[in-house]
Each structure stands twice: as C-alpha cells, then as structure tokens.
Amino acid sequence: MNLSYFIAKRISFKQTGGFSGTIHRIAVGSLALGLGVSILAFMVLGGFQGSISDRVFGFTGHYQVQRFQMSNAFEEAPFSLNSEFIQNSKKLPFLKRIQSFAHKAALIKGDQEVEGILMKGVGKDFDTLAFSRYLVEGRMLHLPDSGVSNEIMLSKLVANKLWLKVGDKVTLYFVQDPPRFRRVEVVGIFETYLENFDEKIVVGELQTIRNLNGWTPDQVGGLELFVDDPKKNASYFSLIENELDLNLKLIDSRERFLEIFDWLTLLDTNVVVFISLIGFVAIFNMGAILFILIMERTQMIGLLKALGARNGQIRLIFFWNGMKILGKGLLLGNLFGLGIGFLQDQFKLVPLEAASYYMTYVPIEWNWPMFIWLNLGIALLTSLVLWIPVMVISRIDPIKSIRFD
C-alpha cells in the first residue's frame, strides 16, 4: 500500500475528532456550498435566458423574411408565396417551419375604451400548438378553408384595458383610405409577459388583412422562419440570405429585439463575476484549511522526517487528504445544487412577479456540459491551490517540530 495514502486515510476526519474533524467538515461544507450555488446560478441564468428567448422566438420566429420597402410603416409590402425562396428553402435542412403573416394597424373599440393595436394576421400554416402555451383563456382561432372567421385573440393586458373577456364582440377600425372596420369576436386571451407584444399585438386572420388591402390569395406580408438550433443563428443567416429573391430581405429576431437580447447577454457577465467570487472564496478556504491542518500536524511531520520520510512523501499525505475533502465537497455540492434545481423544475417552489421578471416562477435549464466543466474547473483549480500550503512542509525542522507545542 502507498505509505502517503495510508497515513492520509488514518488522519482523515472519520478517525479524528475535535478540532481536526471540525476543520474537515468546514472545508467540505464551504466547497459544497460554493459549487452548489454556482450550479444553481447557471441553471437559473440558463433557464431565464432560454425562457425569454423562447417567448420572443415563439411569437416572431428566429428570422423574418419581408419585402424591401422605403417606409418604416408597421405594415409590410406584400410578396407572393410563389417566390423562389419557398422552393429554395427545401434545400435548407435546418429550417423546421415557415409561417406566413401580415400586420395592419387599427383601433379596437370596446364598450367603454378605445385602444391602438397592431393586428397580426396568421394563416393555416400557423403553429397553434406552439402558441397555445401562451393562451390563458378561451381557444385558438378557427381558420376556415374559404371566407373569413372574424375571430381574434387579445393579450391579457389589452383585454384588461378594454374590460373585455372571451366571447365579447368588438369593432376594429382600420386606418386607410377609405377607412374600413370589422366586427369581430374575442375567442382567446394570451399572455407572454413581454411588453413588446402584450401592449399592442392582436392575433387575427391573415385573410382579413388580404381583403382589406386588396391582396391576392397567395400574397403575404412576411414569413417567419424557425430553425432547429437558435444558438447557430449567426451561421444560418448567410445560408438563408443566399436563397432569397432579390426583392426580399432577411431580419434576425435578435437584431430586431436587440434591447432584450443585449439585456440577457449582460446577465452572463453578472453571473460570471458572482461565480468567480464564490469560487475564489471556496478555493481560498481549502488552501487555508489545509495549512491549518499542516500546522496542527507539525509534530507528526517532524517525527516522520526523523524516521526518514522524504518531503515529497509527507506532501502527498496532506495532498491526498485535501483531495478527499475535494471529492466529498464536489459530491455534496452536486447533490445540493442539482437537487434544489430538480425540486424547482418539478414543483415551481420559488415564484416570481410576472410584471418584473416576465414569468411566474424561477425557470431551470439542465445544461449538463456546463455542469461538467464547472466541476472540472473547480477540481483543477483546487488541486493546484492545495500544493501551495504543502510546500511549507519542506521548511519544517524535525527537531524543533517534535518539541513543537
């Protein structure tokens, strides 16, 4: 048996009580707490960023294809679904789904209030299943094969402002020459918690906008593109752009809602600083505690030197002791962080105020590669730091240390 490892096992906190046992437990606890909190921080950050991004992408797609136009109006210039891009898009395997849409500004009049809104018209290719997660009351639109349904879905914010509920009839006044209006029924109420959408968007039928604008049945205001991996948006952009018709442009949702995604990026910096401070304190504690253990075992070190033990062998005794503390700290830290994350993910124990955080509970993301790298990083840095206090052993004089009290 390796002598250093054997002695390290004999002086571990299982076999020693009092001060040594307390010091060992403090070391394990501080490392476990630091790792557990770091894991939770990454889980919450990833969950928060993913939840906000999913809401934006779910409402607008990862990209939008629109026709070039000189004005900055809310309404898009129409183009045909028979464009070359629709055929070329089949060459792009990363495209999961394409949805047609169009926008038109209007005034919505309830019994007591009037509100300016932007009607988003959707067609038969609209993914009702994905959008249904935002639905809080009522049902999705019924889109007939012919004619129009005269149904709309309001955000909860707009519905509350106008004192409307599911089943109410309202009038939409469209600003155009000549002015037009439509009598519609509220069949659903949705809530994304994002002001960019909830304050102004009303979801209706694309055919209604076609009729109001005098478009042909194959014309749309734009296309929403959904890809398989949003993290590759930058690399996908040029591939999609190369397949566009000359009169069409591609818009990245990250650029369109830059203020939201810049804010999410800033959170990365905050979490990195926070975790760096926690990691520094935990690793520094490990070094300091090992140094205390060495000082407590000064007489043992002197006796081993007097018996002929080399400095390297004695260093390994305390290094193995530190590695044992590290292993237990990592194990307990992972159990603590992943355990609390699992409970929050399953039972939503910690609620949030939707008006401030855009969601009703703390979200959790299971980023296993990040957890592995975090464990490896802490293990590597702690192992390096452990060598600093053990270097003191070479300066201990065996005669003085045996008499040390």
Image (cartoon, helix red, strand yellow):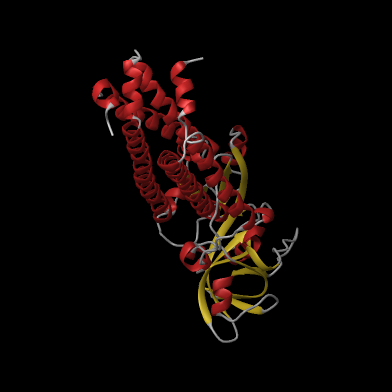
Residue at x-position 67% and y-position 79%: 169
Residue at x-position 32% and y-position 38%: 288
Along the viewing direction, whichever of 294 and 148 lies nearer the viewer: 294
* Left or right placement of residue 161 versus residue 303 in this view: right
386 over 196 or under it: above or below: above
Along the viewing direction, whichever of 383 and 296 lies nearer the viewer: 296
> Residue 51: x, y in percent?
54, 53
Along the viewing direction, whichever of 319 and 373 lies nearer the viewer: 319
Residue at x-position 66% and y-position 59%: 132
Residue at x-position 39% and y-position 32%: 382
197 over 223 or under it: above or below: below
State whether residue 366 appears in this view: no
> Residue 355: x, y in percent?
49, 68
141 over 260 or under it: above or below: below
Along the viewing direction, whichever of 47 and 137 lies nearer the viewer: 47
* Total marks placed: 0
* Left or right placement of residue 368 versus residue 150 in this view: left
Which residue sits furthest front? 403
- Choose top left, top right, bottom left or bottom right for residue 82: top right
> Residue 147: x, y in percent?
73, 64
Which residue sits furthest bottom? 112
Which residue sits furthest top? 308
- Choose top left, top right, bottom left or bottom right for residue 129: bottom right
- Could you tell me which quadrant the C terminus lies in? top left
State whether residue 130 appears in this view: yes
> Residue 351: x, y in percent?
55, 63
